[in-house]
Image (cartoon, rainbow, N blue to C red):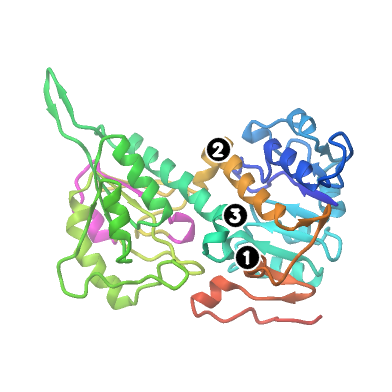
Amino acid sequence: MRIGVPRELRNGETRVALTPESVKRLIALARPKDADPGAPSPLQIDVEPGAGDRASFDDAQYQDAGARIADGAEAVWRESDLVVCVNPPAPAQASLMREGAALLGSLRSTGEPELIETLRSRRISAMAFEAIPRITRAQKVDVLSSMATIAGYRAVLHGALACPKIFPMLMTAAGTVTASRVLILGAGVAGLQAIATAKRLGAVVEAYDVRAAAAEQVESLGARFLRLEDPGAETDAETAGGYARELTPEEQAAQRERLARHIAQADVVITTAQVPGRAAPRLIDRATTERMRPGAVIVDMAAESGGNCELTRAGERVEHNGVVILGPVNLPAETPVHASIMHSRNAAAFIADMIKDGELRIDMEDEVVRGAMITHDGEIVHNPTREAMGLPKWEKESTA
């Protein structure tokens, strides 16, 4: 059995799908339990030259872990039984894969129809991390949560560096310096990590989420949960899968109106609201931005999916009436070592459950594997994220 680890080609990407630590673990796991410790493993892991360089894992480290450095990128895609990636491959890369091989990665399956069709036509068993069901048994393979944790941490650092104030309260010979006020909009994994990081830096932290259950989590971290006063304002917008559903236009308008005065008082606002498969909900319009104090900062973590702020531009810094709006993209790539380690451990845990007697065994009866599967055996199986959102399936379901 051969697993391939390609170099990521996305602009600005620094992560690698598997680290030497996980490579060594997988090679050892694939070796039969009764085999001599020095016996060859039935698993060979091929790493594209330089795949881990940007995450500080060089080729020598992979070789020491038991991997083989492949002849080049094409060899990784053509010769592997399973390719593990961070970002979706280009359709041209996927077309190099041998028929019946497998692919594991974050495939952005709701927005890559050309790639999905290529995978289907090549009879690739394509498993997407973003489609893994949110159940207890799947926590060890939850790449989305791992990357959201890194992103929430980095977003606060962006806000702290851009803010003209320091975060903590200080008692000094020059008098008392008051703490900065940080508002987190959205209390999912990224939001909760942002809360924890802002608290560690000494800020006064408030948070809001459309899911009523988030209040307890927010308060457990020492932040104040905003309970909007009007009856019915705290609509419980949590789906069965644990995600926030998209609010109706009426709900969004009411939410913006009630949040506006809290946003106007904040020194840093970090927005994290995203809905799988949809454009990011608009939380901060131009008028609300113009109510903020000069020097205030907005860090929009949803910049890549359209932005929670009307003035956000993905990958850019915008200044409007003295307010700075940051639209960072691919925040996990800014911390490539730990982001790669976390991604790799999640991926290795997923792969380990599929290795039986040194071979890759895809068990469609396993709810985690079945839930992650996007294409299999010439069919577009399903997209749980789209279905959970009430969206139609892909038009081309099967031509097997």
Residue at the disc numbered 2: 338
Query: Position of 19 compared to 242: left or right?
Result: right
Q: Nearer the viewer, residue 114 or 126?
A: 126
Range covered by the magenta-colored residues: 285-306
Q: Height in image: 217 above or below 336?
A: below
Q: Amino acid at mark 3?
A: Val
Q: Amino acid at mark 2?
A: His
Picture coordinates of residue 278, whole percent (x, y): 48, 69
Please tell me in which quadrant of the rendered image residue 227 appears: bottom left
Secondary structure beneath dot 3 equals helix
Q: Amino acid at mark 1?
A: Val
Q: Height in image: 92 above or below 159?
A: below
Indicate yes or no whether the magenta region holds residue 292: yes
Residue at the disc numbered 1: 368
Secondary structure beneath dot 2 equals helix
Q: CA distance from mark 2 to mark 3?
A: 16 Å
Secondary structure beneath dot 1 equals helix
Q: Are the residues at dot 1 and dot 3 in contact (C-beta closer than 8 Å)?
A: yes
Q: CA distance from mark 2 to mark 1?
A: 25 Å
Q: Are the residues at dot 2 and dot 1 in contact (C-beta closer than 8 Å)?
A: no
Residue at the disc numbered 3: 141
**Which residue corresponds to the image point at 60% horizontal and 47% vertical from the top-left?**
343
Picture coordinates of residue 180, whole percent (x, y): 22, 39
